[in-house]
Image (cartoon, rainbow, N blue to C red):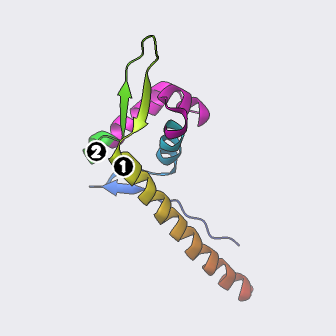
């Protein structure tokens, strides 16, 4: 038997942020592009944008800043708020995993 859980952040009962959006923000940070980040995490560009806009609208803060294309190309980067949200989410996720590992050891020790 193993313990599993999914976590996400909600505001007023609406989904704000979870593992999929965290992976997308991490990819944006690495790639510097929503399109490239979406491809890396297996999403269409349109769906990635939709997820980001929904989170920003519900939370009332910008997660990313974009610049338009041109001769130098466009790009995207995380805002300070986006970076902070990602950092807190990963910290909470890590703490939950540690707690689950401890409980998993207890289950195994009890023969469950």
Is 100 left or right of 92, judged from the image as shown?
Answer: right
Name the residue that disc number 1 marks. 16
Q: Which is nearer the eye, 38 or 77?
A: 77
Name the residue rendered at 42%, 12% in the picture: 70
Name the residue rendered at 42%, 16% in the picture: 69
On screen, residue 108 above or below 16: below
Look at the magenta stretch and give its main secondary structure: helix
Mark sitting on residue 58: 2
Q: From the top left corner, tell me how far across and down residue 33 is, in percent.
A: 49, 29
Q: Residue furthest top?
A: 71
Residue 71 part of the magenta-drawn span: no
Q: From the top left corner, tell me how far across and down residue 45 is, in percent.
A: 49, 26
Q: Residue furthest right?
A: 111
Q: From the top left corner, tell me how far across and down residue 89 is, in percent.
A: 45, 58
**Which type of secondary structure does the marked residue at label 1 adopt?**
strand
**Which type of secondary structure does the marked residue at label 2 adopt?**
helix
Magenta residues span 29-55
The crowd level at tag 2 (other Cα within 10 Å; few <14, some 14-19, many 20+) is some
Q: Residue furthest bottom?
A: 110
């Amino acid at each position: 038997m193993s313990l599993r859980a999914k976590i996400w952040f909600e505001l007023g009962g609406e989904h704000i942020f979870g593992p999929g959006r965290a992976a997308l923000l991490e990819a944006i940070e690495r790639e510097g592009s929503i399109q490239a980040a979406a491809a890396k995490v297996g999403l269409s560009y349109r769906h990635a944008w939709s997820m980001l806009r929904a989170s920003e609208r519900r939370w009332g803060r910008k997660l990313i800043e974009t610049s338009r294309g041109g001769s130098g190309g466009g790009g995207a980067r995380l805002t300070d708020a986006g970076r902070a949200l990602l950092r807190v989410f990963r910290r909470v996720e890590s703490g939950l995993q540690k707690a689950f590992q401890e409980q998993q050891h207890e289950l195994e020790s009890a023969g469950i």
